[in-house]
Structure formats: structure tokens, C-alpha cells
Image (cartoon, rainbow, N blue to C red):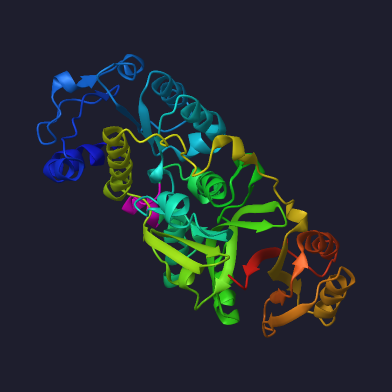
């Protein structure tokens, strides 16, 4: 990402100077291993290994933190704010965990912190929520915010391959990291959801409060059955306001195959927002990559530079409202979340199986909307697919605990939540 920012600073120097009325100057770069690069105009005198000293230099106005991780990024940002600098960062993991502290520090020192690059890469969703949609009350946010997972699920759907094969293809193409855990287990999406919740609903929460599941258990059969039921499977980051409580969850989700989000494939991201007055809007684009993310960083730099030039007094409202009005989010327990569900059972091929499963579901307040039962063949077990009507998650968990005890049901039952009315 840092290389992309330098490229844009060099390539668009004249454009930025015209937009601001004065030039932007790259004062220094702190990096432990960076070497001079003639093509980028990075000379030896621009490079330092001492990041702590750099952020305190009086000739620097804006500090751009692109280290990632919690430390030293956290300490450097706090020091920069305390020494009179504005800050730009794309560090969603840091802001998800320590955003309250950092945003408070920015407000206390009356300095700006730009973080557009932390969610959605080049999609301007932070600025949209903070400014363009500020006149509305947001009711729900649905996000495809991890390009790695979206690419893997797209490959599984289009090529009918297993998860491991789709992951290997994503790693070979550079879309997935050598260690993809942060992405495929849903943690990256959960970090981004924390920031979306704060901007949409004014509540701070940490990743520990977000119910998080990844995509590793999705099978080609699930994708096929979803298609037969009229759905597509996406890893969604979901936030909803419900009577003062916030639903905050990341998990594989079935959505209608003709919904706009279902058509977002490959490594693209999309955020779908439902507002009380405006209704639904969607923001779509490349969610990762050096140059898309660098454009978001540069947008923050330009906004802060304009405010500095104009002497604007309200630059400390990073979240679009005073920090004293930002509350800790009250998160709705998953047991209370109401969804429709896709259920997949591997059952012994004998009469009465479907009736036994249906009976347990009914006793736990779960009604069946549709069933797919494969024809009998040579196999000893056959898949039984059900779609339920809406029910609280606690009912489903209780029912599944009883179904697992049935000797006629083999492998652990699988379920995927359905969002029918986005």
C-alpha cells in the first residue's frame, strides 16, 4: 500500500497541487528494510529506520501509518496526535480493537484521523456514511468486505470445486495470503464490521463482540442446493439496529440469487445500506490491492490538507459526531437473532428419517418451508436439505442438539443462515 501512495504522490503531483492550491511534499518514509528506488523517486535521504523520531518532527503535518498490526502502529499514532500531527491509516485491525482510545485522542488533541482505506479498499464507504448519509437514520448494513473469501466462493460456485482447491487457486493468483486464516475464518471482515457499526449507528464495539464464522465448511453441495432453492452464498458482515441493540455478525449467508449483492463476484467488495428515509443503496468496487487502497489513503490526505490550509475547526470529528456522544454498542446475543435457515443432514436411507427430523424441529418451534431429498441409490446415507421459516437461533441450536442424537442421522448437521429480505 505504501508503494501505491508514493506512486500517486509522484504521478499526480500537479493534479494535487491544483486541487489544494499548493503542493504536497513527501517529507520522509520510515521503513526497516526499504531501499532507494529511482523509479519512485525515493532517495536515501527520504528513508529512516527511526519511526518514533520521525512522527515527532516539527516539519511534518500529516503522518500516514501503513505498518498494520497493533504495535508499533498504536504507539506511533498516539504520539503523532499528541505532537500536533493529523493521521491517516488503513489499519482496520488496530481501529477495531483500539479505535475508542485513538478517536478519543484525536478529539482531545483536536486533530484529524482519516481511515477511509480501512474498509472496502477504494470504495469511499467511510466518507459516505460519515457525510453523504448523515441526514438519514441507518437501519441495516450488509457487506461483502473480504475479497479473498468472495473470490473463493465465486470459484467454488463457477467451477464446482472444493474449498481447498479454490483456496489454492486464490493463493496461486496472489488473492489469498500464504496464511489465509485472518480472511477465511472471517476475522478481517469482523474488524471492518466494527468500524461500519460505529459509523452507521454511533456505537463502539470490539471484534470479540462480533459473532464470527468463516467459509471453510462450505461445500460445493451447499452451493448447488442453495442454487436450487434460489440463493447464492456470500460471506456477509451484517449489522442491524433493533430496538437499541445492534446485531453484529459475520458468517456465510444465503441471499436471493437475483439480489444485487449476489452478483458481486471475484475479489470485489460491496456494502449495501438500508436507510430509514433513503431506502437501500449499494457501494461496489475493488476492495483490496495496492492502487485502489492507495486512492483511499490519498483521499484522506487531500481532505486533511484542505482543512489545514483553511484552518477548519471541526477536523476532530472522525466519526461524524462528537466523541462524548459515541456510546458502547449493546450487541444482541446470537441466541436472540431471528433468521431463516438452510439445513443439511446426512441421514441413513430408511423410512421415517424425514418425519423424525421434522418432528424435532416442530417441537422446538421451527416450521419447514421446503425440502430437497435425494433419490435413493446405492449409498447408505443420503442428504436431506431443508429450508426453515424464521426462528430464533436458540430454537435451532436446541433442535440440532436433539437431532444429533438420532442414530439415523450421520455426520454433524450443517446450517447456513438465510437473509431473505435485504
Residue 334 spot, x, y in % from top left: 73, 54
From the viewer's perspective, is 316 left or right of 394? Answer: left
Q: Say which residue appears at 30% left-offset and 45% top-offset.
A: 299
Q: Nearer the viewer, residue 376 or 365?
A: 365
Assess whether residue 206 is covered by the magenta stretch. no
Q: Quadrant of the C terminus?
A: bottom right
Q: Main SS of the magenta segment?
A: helix
Q: Nearer the viewer, residue 363 or 345?
A: 363
Residue 51 spot, x, y in % from top left: 33, 19
Q: Say which residue appears at 32% left-offset and 37% top-offset.
A: 307
Q: Quadrant of the N terminus?
A: top left
Asked if residue 88 is positioned above or below residue 227 in the image, the reply reads above
Residue 136 spot, x, y in % from top left: 53, 60
Q: Say which residue appears at 51% left-offset and 62% top-offset.
A: 273
From the viewer's perspective, is 65 left or right of 282? Answer: left
Is residue 154 among the parts visible in the rendering?
Answer: yes
Q: Nearer the viewer, residue 92 or 16?
A: 16
Q: Nearer the viewer, residue 43 or 352?
A: 43
Residue 331 spot, x, y in % from top left: 70, 48
Q: Total number of numbered labels?
A: 0
From the viewer's perspective, is 334 left or right of 301? Answer: right
Is residue 217 among the parts visible in the rendering?
Answer: no
From the viewer's perspective, is 234 left or right of 27? Answer: right
**Magenta-highlighted residues:** 169-176
Q: Say which residue appears at 33% left-offset and 14% top-offset.
A: 53
Amino acid at each position: 500500500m505504501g508503494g501505491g501512495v508514493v506512486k500517486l504522490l509522484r504521478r499526480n503531483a500537479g493534479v494535487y497541487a491544483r486541487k489544494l492550491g499548493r503542493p504536497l511534499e513527501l517529507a520522509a518514509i520510515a521503513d526497516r528494510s526499504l531501499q532507494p528506488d529511482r523509479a519512485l523517486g525515493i532517495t536515501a535521504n527520504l528513508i529512516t529506520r527511526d519511526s518514533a523520531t520521525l512522527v515527532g518532527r516539527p516539519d511534518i503535518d500529516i503522518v500516514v501509518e501503513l505498518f498494520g498490526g497493533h504495535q508499533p502502529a498504536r504507539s506511533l499514532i498516539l504520539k503523532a496526535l499528541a505532537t500536533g500531527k493529523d493521521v491517516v491509516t488503513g489499519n482496520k485491525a488496530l481501529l477495531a480493537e483500539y479505535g475508542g482510545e485513538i478517536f478519543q485522542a484525536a478529539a482531545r488533541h483536536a486533530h484529524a484521523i482519516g481511515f477511509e482505506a480501512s474498509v472496502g479498499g477504494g470504495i469511499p464507504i467511510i466518507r459516505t456514511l460519515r457525510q453523504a448519509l448523515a441526514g438519514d437514520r441507518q437501519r441495516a448494513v450488509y457487506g461483502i468486505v473480504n475479497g479473498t473469501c468472495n473470490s473463493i466462493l465465486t470459484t467454488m460456485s463457477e467451477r464446482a470445486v472444493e474449498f481447498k482447491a479454490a483456496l489454492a487457486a486464490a493463493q496461486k493468483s496472489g488473492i489469498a495470503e500464504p496464511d489465509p486464516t485472518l480472511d477465511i475464518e472471517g476475522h478481517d471482515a469482523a474488524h471492518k464490521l466494527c468500524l461500519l457499526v460505529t459509523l452507521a449507528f454511533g456505537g463502539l464495539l470490539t471484534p470479540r463482540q462480533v459473532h464470527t464464522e468463516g467459509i471453510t465448511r462450505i461445500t460445493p453441495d451447499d452451493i448447488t442446493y442453495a442454487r436450487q432453492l434460489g440463493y447464492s452464498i456470500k460471506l456477509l458482515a451484517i449489522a442491524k439496529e433493533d430496538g437499541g441493540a445492534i446485531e453484529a455478525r459475520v458468517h456465510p449467508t444465503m441471499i436471493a440469487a437475483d439480489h444485487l449483492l449476489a452478483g458481486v463476484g471475484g475479489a470485489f467488495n460491496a456494502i449495501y445500506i438500508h436507510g430509514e428515509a433513503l431506502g437501500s443503496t449499494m457501494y461496489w468496487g475493488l476492495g483490496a490491492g495496492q492502487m485502489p487502497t492507495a486512492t483511499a489513503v490519498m483521499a484522506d490526505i487531500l481532505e486533511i490538507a484542505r482543512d489545514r490550509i483553511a484552518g477548519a475547526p471541526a477536523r476532530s470529528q472522525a466519526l461524524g459526531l462528537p466523541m462524548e456522544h459515541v456510546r458502547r454498542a449493546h450487541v444482541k446475543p446470537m441466541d436472540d437473532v431471528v433468521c431463516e435457515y438452510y439445513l443439511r443432514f446426512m441421514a441413513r436411507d430408511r423410512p421415517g428419517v424425514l418425519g423424525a427430523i421434522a418432528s424435532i424441529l416442530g417441537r422446538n418451534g421451527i416450521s419447514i418451508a421446503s425440502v430437497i431429498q435425494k433419490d435413493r441409490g446405492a449409498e447408505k446415507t443420503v442428504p436431506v436439505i431443508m429450508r426453515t421459516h424464521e426462528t430464533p437461533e436458540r430454537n435451532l441450536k436446541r433442535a440440532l442438539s436433539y437431532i444429533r442424537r438420532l442414530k439415523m442421522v450421520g455426520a454433524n448437521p450443517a446450517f447456513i443462515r438465510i437473509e431473505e429480505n435485504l
